[in-house]
Amino acid sequence: MNIEVSHGNPSDEELAVVVALLTAAHSAPTAADEPQPSNWARPVMRQTPAPGPGAWWRSGIPQP
């Protein structure tokens, strides 16, 4: 990474702050980096089907 000061005469401490901020901004995680929860974490997967006619059939069909 090349940083060039085009105007002014910043001190070493001011440049260090700018470099630290740019480095932190570059390495900050984004929303796309977060893992997506698996389908097993969906609340629908934790529900048991209501007993009655068709319960076995409904237990094997994924619900939205």
Image (spheres, helix red, strand yellow):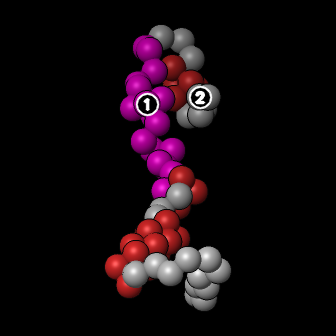
Nearer to us in this view, 22 or 51: 22
Give the residue furthest to the front: 8
Front disc: 2 or 1: 1
Give the residue furthest to the top: 52
The Cα atoms of the two marked residues, 2 and 1, are separated by: 10 Å
Give the main secondary structure, helix, strand or loop, of the magenta stretch: loop
The magenta segment is 34-51
Q: x%, y% of residue 23? A: 46, 75
Quadrant containing the C terminus is: top right
Q: x%, y% of residue 45? A: 45, 34
Q: Are marks 2 and 1 in contact (CB under 8 Å)?
A: no
Give the residue furthest to the left: 13
Give the residue furthest to the bottom: 2
Residue ID at (53%, 58%): 30
User: Residue 35 shows which numbered tag?
Assistant: none
Q: In this picture, is 61 found above or below 10?
A: above
Q: In this picture, is 42 found above or below 2?
A: above
Q: Amino acid at mark 1?
A: Pro
User: Residue 43 shows which numbered tag?
Assistant: 1
Residue ID at (54%, 12%): 53
| Location of residue 50 (image quadrant) | top left
